[in-house]
């Protein structure tokens, strides 16, 4: 009997080990990692040419289109390899990433809502936006002019996406420190997986979302399915072991 109890206990323990694995598979926790920047949704100009953004006046009316040859978006994944990003922007993005990752720098989520903080929000995308031309930076510097970009993030309708930019970022001469300020920017979840952002300047950009588990797509209520499978597996193991044990006992009795 002791042998049977030991075997059953081992089966139960083995089944319980499945719980962390299932939980880990269900979780999706974005982070500041080396990954590509989100795709920009193109905007057709009056001639049908695809722009990647627009410059708008204070009334939101388009005053010019911005094309890929003038604007470069550099994800943290390409901070060391991109040949298009201006060198000073590269250094600032690299330092911002380093400080965010180490926890030296934190995003001021409370500026948006007191319910947001570093404990319940996490950065899912970090990249730099820089101009390569001279005309558009001058236009953007004018009062009331903004740059509008739409990113395909694949977020659900109504999902919270906090967008911040690192304004006034400057490195010291020794490049051992950085000064600047994270500022929230206007961002609209369009409900189709995309988010439209309105920028007053080009600089490092961070997209943040609430932490927690992202539930899988469901066709019905399957929330209790993992536990049911674990219980069923444990029960089946106990039955099998019991049958084997009894057969072994009969064999020895004969």
Image (spheres, helix red, strand yellow):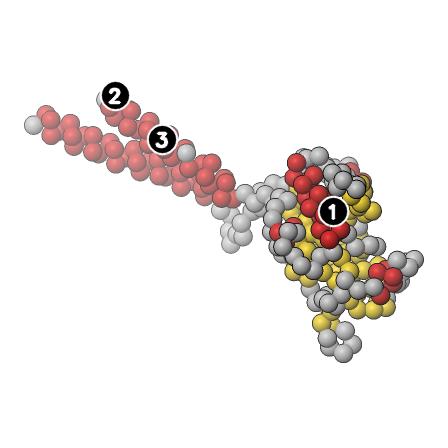
Q: Which residue, as the protein is rendered here, is positioned at the far front?
A: 174
Q: Give the image location of residue 199, x and y in percent.
A: 80, 55
Frontmost residue, 18 versus 44: 44
Q: Which residue is mark 3?
A: 12
Label 1 sits on a secondary structure element that is helix
* Residue 2 marker: 2
Label 2 sits on a secondary structure element that is helix
**Residue 64 visible here:** yes
Q: CA distance from mark 2 to mark 3?
A: 15 Å
Q: CA distance from mark 1 to mark 3?
A: 53 Å
Frontmost residue, 11 versus 121: 121
Label 3 sits on a secondary structure element that is helix
In which quadrant is the C terminus drawn?
top left
Disc 1 crowd rating (10 Å Cα; few below 14, some 14-19, many 20+) is: many
Q: Which residue, as the protein is rendered here, is positioned at the far left?
A: 254
Residue at screen point 10% across, 25% down: 253
Looking at the image, how many numbered discs can be counted on the residues? 3
Q: Give the image location of residue 159, x and y in percent.
A: 68, 50
Disc 2 crowd rating (10 Å Cα; few below 14, some 14-19, many 20+) is: few
Left of 247 or right of it: where is 2?
Answer: right
> Which numbered disc, 1 or 3, marks the residue closer to the eye?
1
First in sequence: mark 2 or mark 3? Answer: 2
* Residue 147 marker: none
Residue at screen point 73% across, 67% down: 69
Q: Give the image location of residue 239, x and y in percent.
A: 27, 35
In which quadrant is the N terminus drawn?
top left
**Residue 156 visible here:** no
Q: Which residue is mark 1?
A: 92
Q: Quadrant of residue 191?
A: bottom right
Disc 3 crowd rating (10 Å Cα; few below 14, some 14-19, many 20+) is: some
């Amino acid at each position: 009997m002791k042998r049977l109890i030991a075997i059953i206990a081992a089966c139960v323990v083995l089944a319980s080990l499945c719980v962390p694995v299932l939980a880990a598979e269900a979780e999706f926790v974005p982070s500041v990692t080396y990954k590509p920047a989100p795709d920009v949704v193109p905007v057709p100009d009056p001639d049908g040419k695809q722009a990647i953004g627009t410059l708008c006046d204070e009334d939101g009316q388009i005053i010019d289109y911005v094309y890929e040859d003038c604007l470069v978006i550099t994800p943290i994944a390409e901070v060391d390899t991109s040949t298009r990003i201006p060198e000073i922007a590269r250094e600032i993005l690299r330092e911002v990433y380093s400080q965010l990752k180490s926890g030296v720098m934190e995003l001021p989520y409370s500026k948006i809502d007191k319910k947001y903080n570093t404990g319940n929000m996490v950065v899912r995308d970090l990249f730099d936006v820089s101009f390569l031309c001279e005309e558009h930076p001058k236009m953007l510097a004018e009062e009331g002019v903004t740059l509008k970009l739409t990113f395909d993030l694949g977020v659900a309708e109504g999902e919270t996406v906090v967008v911040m930019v690192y304004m006034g970022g400057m490195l010291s001469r020794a490049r051992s420190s950085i000064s600047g300020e994270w500022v929230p920017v206007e961002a609209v979840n369009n409900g189709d997986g995309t988010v439209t952002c309105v920028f007053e300047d080009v600089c490092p950009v961070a997209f943040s979302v609430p932490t927690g588990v992202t539930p899988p797509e469901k066709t019905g209520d399957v929330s209790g399915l993992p536990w049911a499978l674990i219980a069923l597996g444990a029960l089946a193991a106990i039955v099998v072991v019991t049958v084997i044990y009894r057969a072994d006992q009969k064999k020895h009795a004969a």
